Image (tube, rainbow, N blue to C red):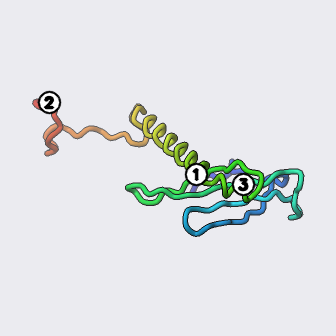
Amino acid sequence: MADLSGLKAEMDAGNLFEEKIISDRKVGTIRVLTPVKADGTADASRTPVFMGEVQIMTHMGALPISFEIKAGTLAEAVASYGEAAKQGVEDTLKRLEDLREQAAHRIVTPGTEGFQVPPQGGSGISGSGLVGL
């Protein structure tokens, strides 16, 4: 069983939001995060946050992408959804490419995940390109 002694799962009572989901049932979803106080009443001292969601199809299936929409009202968020979604997809694809590049350049050493001992000679594995070893 995992050691959970260092787990900190306390919520920040000064940074609470109530969530409402808005969708056109065609393209995507906007989550409206309305600031609230710890007692559940609206917190007018903070501005709402608008989060967009979209899915893109990949060869591995649907990839959900979330992104923030810079807007002050729901109407502005709806109007800005398309550009924000495009930027969110571009940012996600860039992060995925960066991760792929980091993984390709990672040095694998004994004891790390992904390390495999090379097959011994005469193991029956062919096509290795190591003739006469």
Circle nearer the viewer, 1 or 3: 3
Q: How far apart are marks 1 and 2 (CA)?
A: 54 Å
Residue 96 in the image: state x and y as whole percent: 48, 43
Mark found first going from the N terminus, 1 or 2: 1
Circle nearer the viewer, 2 or 3: 3
Callout 3 amino acid: Glu
Mark found first going from the N terminus, 2 or 3: 3
Q: How far apart are marks 2 and 3 (CA)?
A: 67 Å
Along the line of sight, the residue nearer the viewer: 1 or 55: 55
Q: Tell me which residue sits at (63%, 66%) in the image.
A: 23
Callout 2 amino acid: Leu
Label pair 1/2, CB-CB below 8 angstroms: no
Which residue is label 3 attached to? 76
Q: Tell me which residue sits at (67%, 58%) in the image.
A: 78
Q: Is mark 1 on a helix, strand or loop?
A: helix
State the quadrant of the N terminus. Answer: bottom right
